[in-house]
Every structure is written in structure tokens, then in C-alpha cells.
């Protein structure tokens, strides 16, 4: 009988639950990381500010172009497809900007990394890149590819279109 009484005494009272709930709801948590690019910049500090802003600019062009983010990583570059004449304007220009920027990146692995990390929002350890065995190698190649994106935007995308 003493054990039952002792268990009854040790059981938390409803007041304790009430205070815990108040304490838990008073704290707010914020998710600073929106996608993989934010994760590598804000949470891990693996890419620098210039690489991050160039990636964001490409990401915005990708979103403006109405290109769909893929749920699974892709080794395919965005294809030409048919252009709807009613969609001429900023969407078509953004689509061309994305294609020219990806064309400006040297090497197929860099293009795959930028497409999947920047445009589709995948982490580097979630997909395979031919010739790259671990995440550190992929991050190094991603940084090089983002330097190409910086160069693309520094030169001006219209000038790049004329030189290609």
C-alpha cells in the first residue's frame, strides 16, 4: 500500500504541466534555413557572401522562369521545350538567363551541382555527381561553379549571350 501512495505523490500535478506549456509556448523558434543554398551559407558557412548572392540571383531567375523544382535530383540540364508565344516577356527572358548561366559554368559536374543545389534546393549528399565521392569534394566543386555564376553576372548576361 505504501508503494501506491508513494507513486501518487510522485506523479506531477496539472499545475506543473500548465507552467511547462506556458514556458514552451513563450519561446519562439525561427527556421533561418529556407533551402540548400541558405543552409550552406547561413548554417554551415561553407560558401561566401558573393557565391551566396550569385546563387540567389540565379535561383530568382529560375523561379521567375516558372521552371519547376524537382523533388528528386536531376542529371539533366533544362531542355529547350516549346515556347508558348503568350508567355513572351520576363518569363522567357528568365528562362534564357538560366540556360545561359548554366552554359557559362565550366564542366558538367559544376552544372549538375548548381542546378540541383541552387535551382532545385537539394543538399549535395542527396545525389551522386560522377567523379565526386564525398560531400567535401562536391562543396569544393560547387564553390568553383558559383564563381562561374558570379563571373556570368559580373560580365552581364547580355554580353555573355553575344559571346556564345
Image: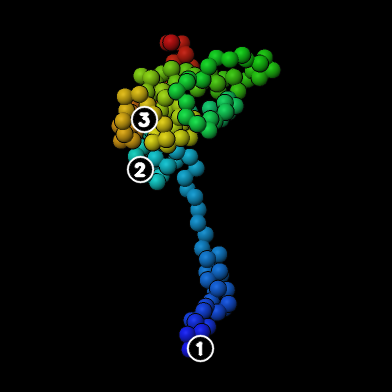
Seen in the picture, residue 86 relative to 45 is either above or below; the reply is above
Residue annotated with mark 3: 142
Seen from the viewer's position, the closer of residues 17 and 51 is: 17
Where is residue 92, by image quadrant? top right
| Nearer to me, 120 or 64 | 120
Q: Residue at x 50, y 56 (%)?
A: 29
Residue designated by label 2: 45
Q: Is residue 88 above or below residue 3?
A: above
Q: Secondary structure at mark 1?
A: loop
In this rendering, the label closer to the viewer, 3 or 1: 1
Nearer to me, 112 or 101? 112
Is label 2 or label 3 in front?
3
What distance separates the C-alpha of mark 3 from that of mark 1? 68 Å
The answer to whether marks 3 and 1 mark residues whose Cβ atoms lie closer than 8 Å is no
Specify whether 87 is left or right of 117: right
Q: Is residue 87 above or below residue 56?
A: above
The reply to whether residue 96 is visible in this rendering is yes
Q: Position of residue 24 (x, y in %)?
A: 52, 66
Amino acid at each position: 500500500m505504501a508503494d501506491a501512495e508513494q507513486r501518487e505523490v510522485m506523479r506531477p500535478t496539472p499545475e506543473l504541466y500548465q507552467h511547462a506549456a506556458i514556458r514552451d509556448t513563450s519561446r519562439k523558434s525561427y527556421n533561418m534555413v529556407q533551402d540548400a543554398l541558405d543552409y550552406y551559407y547561413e548554417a554551415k558557412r561553407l560558401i561566401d557572401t558573393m557565391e551566396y548572392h550569385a546563387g540567389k540571383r540565379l535561383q530568382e531567375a529560375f523561379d521567375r522562369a516558372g521552371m519547376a523544382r524537382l523533388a528528386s535530383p536531376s542529371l539533366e540540364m533544362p531542355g529547350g521545350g516549346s515556347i508558348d508565344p503568350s508567355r513572351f516577356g520576363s518569363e522567357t527572358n528568365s528562362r534564357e538567363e538560366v540556360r545561359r548561366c548554366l552554359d557559362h559554368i565550366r564542366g558538367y559536374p559544376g552544372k549538375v551541382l548548381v542546378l540541383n543545389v541552387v535551382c532545385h534546393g537539394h543538399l549535395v549528399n542527396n545525389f551522386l555527381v560522377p567523379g565526386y565521392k564525398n560531400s567535401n569534394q562536391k562543396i569544393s566543386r560547387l564553390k568553383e561553379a558559383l564563381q562561374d555564376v558570379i563571373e556570368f553576372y559580373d560580365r552581364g548576361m547580355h554580353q555573355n549571350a553575344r559571346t556564345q
